[in-house]
Image: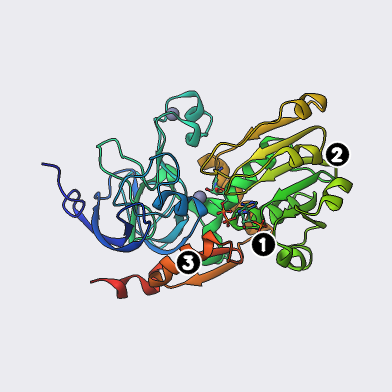
Amino acid sequence: MAKSPEQEHPKKAFGWAARDTSGILSPFKFSRRATGDDDVTFRVLYCGICHSDLHMIKNEWGGTSTYPLVPGHELVGEVTEVGSKVKKVKVGDKVGVGCVVGACHSCENCMNDLEVYCPKMILTDNSFYSDGTLTYGGYSDTMVANERYIIHFPENIPLDASAPLLCAGITVYSPLKYYGLAEPGKHIGVVGLGGLGHLAVKFAKAFGAKVTVISTSISKKDEALEHLGADSFLLSRDQEQVQAAKNTMDGILDTVSAAHSILPLIDLLKSHGKLVLLGVPEKPLELPVFPLLMGRKTVAGSCTGGMKEIQEMVDFAAKHNITADTEIIPMEYVNTAMERLAKGDVRYRFVIDIGNTLAATKP
Ligand code: NAP
Ligand code: ZN
Ligand code: ZN
């Protein structure tokens, strides 16, 4: 008979898990592996809430969720133990783990520091380690990961507001670079001003781009322009505004979490422009072919980023003072936070104060 999550490994751990498709999270005792030679163990202090956590706890991606599901792939904390071969960090260092905790390390993608595109990639949450045990994410007190998957945070960077860089940050940084959009003077559209979107505005501005936010929420207009530094704001349901902006953008990052039409977005692109899909709606989107051909436009995708690029992005963020705008919440607020996230009611990322509030929820 399979061991219970509490007995599988030697290290006791505690977190919050969803048990079924209701997605409701509650206290959960489990275990983590001992610190191996190449491993880093850290005490989790903060963990961001990504919209992917919400998709996963509710099993919105075609039955891919396995319960009990401890979400969280934007976790940061302080190193408590390192294996004998670890070189990257030492006890006391500030570190984090993003979406990935394992890969084959020998395929073409792994050789090119693109572990996230490895066919054997292991996700931080809702995935399986090679020994068949479930991976549990950052809504928990401790984490153990191979040092390849550990990101080192410079001392001057606020950990709570930097946690969301580990997924939201890299997910927008990587396609800006890869698709040639991280250049001064490019006109970039950002669709959906949420966790990913608000960081997309900050990174694109830091690269010197002209940024237009394309949003369904007029209430976000002033913040987008005055606080986040966007150059213009397009209300997506205002046909006149959309019409006037046609054929003006070099690239668009689409971070929308729900089904929506991409035709108006393709129309906003100049010839040869690129629409990069980052959001993962529950249902497939329709692809309008004719407008793509007529402008030799590209519709593409991108998934977070490789470990080397995540470290590069964190260092870039530290240099340019880029952090997430966060609402810090106690652990016991997480179910309410999920309800609010589903309604788009967050400015712009919930981050759970694991270090100060998780232990109090132990039964
Ligand atoms: P979020 O904070 O909820 O932001 C999503 C934004 O999309 C909302 O703030 C809203 O912005 C807009 N939106 C929501 N519903 C919409 C609808 N029906 N029509 C049009 N716009 C809508 O979510 P997030 O954490 O940024 O994540 C966004 C998506 O990216 C999720 O699907 C997530 O799973 C996915 N994701 C992908 C990757 C990757 O590697 N590709 C990584 C992380 C997350 P406005 O109010 O401004 O319209
Ligand atoms: Zn994420
Ligand atoms: Zn590989």
Disc 2: CA contacts within 10 A as few (<14), some (14-19) or many (>=20): some
Say which element carries label 1.
loop
Q: Which residue is mark 2?
A: 247
Disc 1: CA contacts within 10 A as few (<14), some (14-19) or many (>=20): some
> Residue 215 appears in which quarter of the rendering?
bottom right
Residue type, numbered disc 3: Ala
- Quadrant (top left, top right, bottom left, bottom right) of the C terminus: bottom left
Residue 187 percent across, percent down from the top left: 82, 45
Residue 285 percent across, percent down from the top left: 60, 37
Q: Which residue is mark 3?
A: 337
Most extreme residue toward the left is 1
User: In the image, what residue occupies the spot 56% across and 36% down?
Assistant: 284
- Which of the two discs, 1 and 3, sits closer to the camera? 3
Q: Is residue 18 left or right of residue 252?
A: left
Colour scheme in the image? rainbow
User: In the image, what residue occupies the spot 64% across and 44% down?
Assistant: 260
Disc 3: CA contacts within 10 A as few (<14), some (14-19) or many (>=20): many
Chain-order first, disc 3 or disc 2: 2
Residue 174 percent across, percent down from the top left: 62, 42
> Residue 299 appears in which quarter of the rendering?
top right
Label 2 and label 1: CA atoms lie apart by: 32 Å
Q: Which residue is mark 1?
A: 321
Q: Nearer the viewer, residue 37 or 207?
A: 207
Residue 97 showing in the rendered view:
no
